[in-house]
Amino acid sequence: MSTSVTCELHLRLVVSSESSLPVPAGLRYDSADPYAVHATFHTGAQETVDWVFARELLSEGLRRPTGCGDVRVWPSRNRGQGIVCIALSSPEGEALLEAPARALGSFLKR
């Protein structure tokens, strides 16, 4: 029997050094696929973008810069709060997201 863990996060899409936009996201882990975390980014009223990350990539990114190519993850701070930066690249474009480190860490521990 597989176990699932889900989490809703409030990410920030970095538009410029002075501007960002809220991006609600849902994360899902399923023990039937133990190496993956599925993310759904809510980009509009009915629009979503789905990505699959290596669980280890997100876990390592809490502590140090990791990843290459399409996905890079690293710890940082914003306004005194611990965040995790997630840089995504695809043929459709690029995005830099900021996730709250504490919430992401709690999800990965569960």
Image (tube, rainbow, N blue to C red):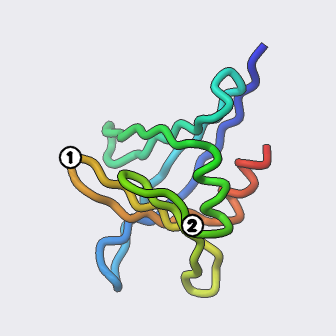
Identify the residue shown where x is 64% and y is 75%. Answer: 82
Q: Position of residue 90 (x, y in %)?
A: 27, 48
Q: Position of residue 34 (x, y in %)?
A: 68, 30
With 77 as the anchor, is 32 left or right in this view? Answer: right
Which label number is shown at residue 19? none
Q: Mark 1 packing: few (<14 Cα in 10 Å), some, or many (20+)? A: few
Q: Nearer the viewer, mark 1 or mark 2?
A: 1
**Which residue matches tag 1?**
91
**Residue positioned most to the left:** 92
**Residue positioned most to the front:** 68
Q: Mark 2 packing: few (<14 Cα in 10 Å), some, or many (20+)? A: many
Q: Position of residue 84 (x, y in %)?
A: 57, 67
Q: Position of residue 61 (x, y in %)?
A: 60, 62
Residue 83 is drawn in which quadrant?
Answer: bottom right
Identify the residue shown where x is 45% and y is 65%. Answer: 12
With 70 as the anchor, is 82 left or right in this view? Answer: right
* Quarter containing the C terminus: top right
Q: Amino acid at mark 1?
A: Pro
Q: Please, is residue 80 above or below residue 43 in the view?
A: below
Q: CA distance from mark 1 to mark 2?
A: 23 Å
With 91 as the anchor, is 86 left or right in this view? Answer: right
Q: Please, is residue 109 above or below residue 5 in the view?
A: below
**Residue positioned most to the top:** 1
Q: Earlier in the sequence, mark 1 or mark 2?
A: 2
**Which residue matches tag 2?**
84
Residue 21 is drawn in which quadrant?
Answer: bottom left
Residue 2 is drawn in which quadrant?
Answer: top right
Disc 1 is placed on an element classified as loop
